[in-house]
Amino acid sequence: MKLADHKPLSRADFHDRLKRIGVERYHDRHPFHKRLHSGECSPDEVRAWVVNRWQYQSRIPMKDAAFMSRLDDPQLRRVWRSRIEDHDGGVDEGGGIRRWLALAQAVGLDPDYVASGVGVLPATRFAVDAYVRFVRDMPLLDAVAASLTEMFAPKIHAERIEGLLKHYDFADETSLSYFRNRLTEARKDVEFGLNYVLDHADTLEKQDAAAAALTFKTDVLWAQLDALWHGYVQGNIPPGAWHPGEGLVVRPEMVGA
Ligand SMILES: O=C(O)c1cc(C(=O)O)c2c(n1)C(=O)C(=O)c1cc(C(=O)O)[nH]c1-2
């Protein structure tokens, strides 16, 4: 290969390359999301999703804290810390984590059970832990690039709000407030993260690494839904994972069952 072939892509072409990864690999294409958003999930499939997605929610601020612990630039820390604030919030008002537990309650689950993390599928735990470790251990550019799946998240959040409101009795503005809030929070995060990656990936090697990081992250998301499908749509619940009937607040009239 000639030296000239090693030139980095232009900013616009590199941006297109990143967007293409989303088109081809983002988890909005996964059959579980199609099932969830079109009202085909049973109440227990919805509960299984809420129990398992908790693992992701609870680890996101931990991965952001791991990322921040590596930054020696106060300005970068200042920008990044709003991600932790979005999820943790203050004692009184709470944040995304508390909103997720409001969703748990709306689908009939005991929020304390969900927050305990007991019952999370092993594959989900492995996938999410791999993301936290990736962000802790890999170059900063790769760590930021991995967060860029959020470029594709507002579309899936909007689809989810619409689909859940249409098809499930538990869905209302309170139970879905997590997703409503993410619509604005994610835009702010992506604007910063995307510019960081476009600015810092100034060689073809770095662009390749950033694209690989984003691809890895799509795998983290996809693997969680594969596990959910295998466990709860196909009925192969692994030892130790949540079983229908566990962790409920006993209000069977909920969830349009
Ligand atoms: O519902 C979704 O499909 C979805 C996807 C993603 C994502 O693409 O990683 C995130 C979220 N939601 C989300 O709510 C969220 O807070 C979030 C943070 C991050 C991240 O990598 O830092 N991704 C996501």
Image: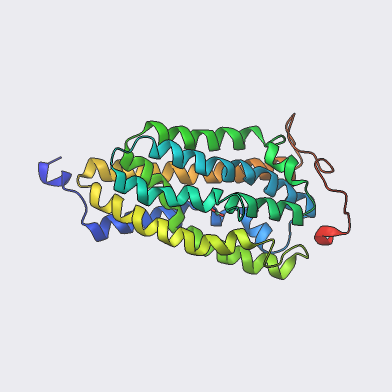
Residue 11 position, x and y percent, is 23, 57
Task: Using residue 106 as the reference point, say whether residue 8 is left or right of it.
Answer: left
Among the 4 quarters of the image, the one containing residue 115: top right
- Where 149 falls versus 176 (above or below)? above
Q: Which residue is drawn at 24% across and 52% down?
A: 199
The image quadrant where one finds the C terminus is bottom right
Residue 138 position, x and y percent, is 36, 33
Residue furthest to the front: 92
Q: Which colour scheme is used?
A: rainbow
- Where 150 falls versus 117 (above or below)? below
Residue 122 position, x and y percent, is 64, 32
Residue 252 position, x and y percent, is 88, 54
Q: Residue at x 75, y 57 (%)?
A: 106
The image quadrant where one finds the N terminus is top left
Q: Which of 43 and 84 is in front in this view?
A: 84
Q: Residue at x 46, y 54 (%)?
A: 150
Q: Which of 24 and 174 is in front in this view?
A: 174
Residue furthest to the left: 3
Q: Residue at x 78, y 48 (%)?
A: 109
Task: Using residue 255 as the reference point, say whether residue 97 is left or right of it.
Answer: left
- Where 156 falls versus 8 (above or below)? below
- Where 166 falls versus 16 (above or below)? below
Task: Using residue 109 as the reference point, say whether residue 209 is left or right of it.
Answer: left
Q: Nearer the viewer, residue 162 or 54?
A: 54
Q: How many marks do you count on the picture? A: 0
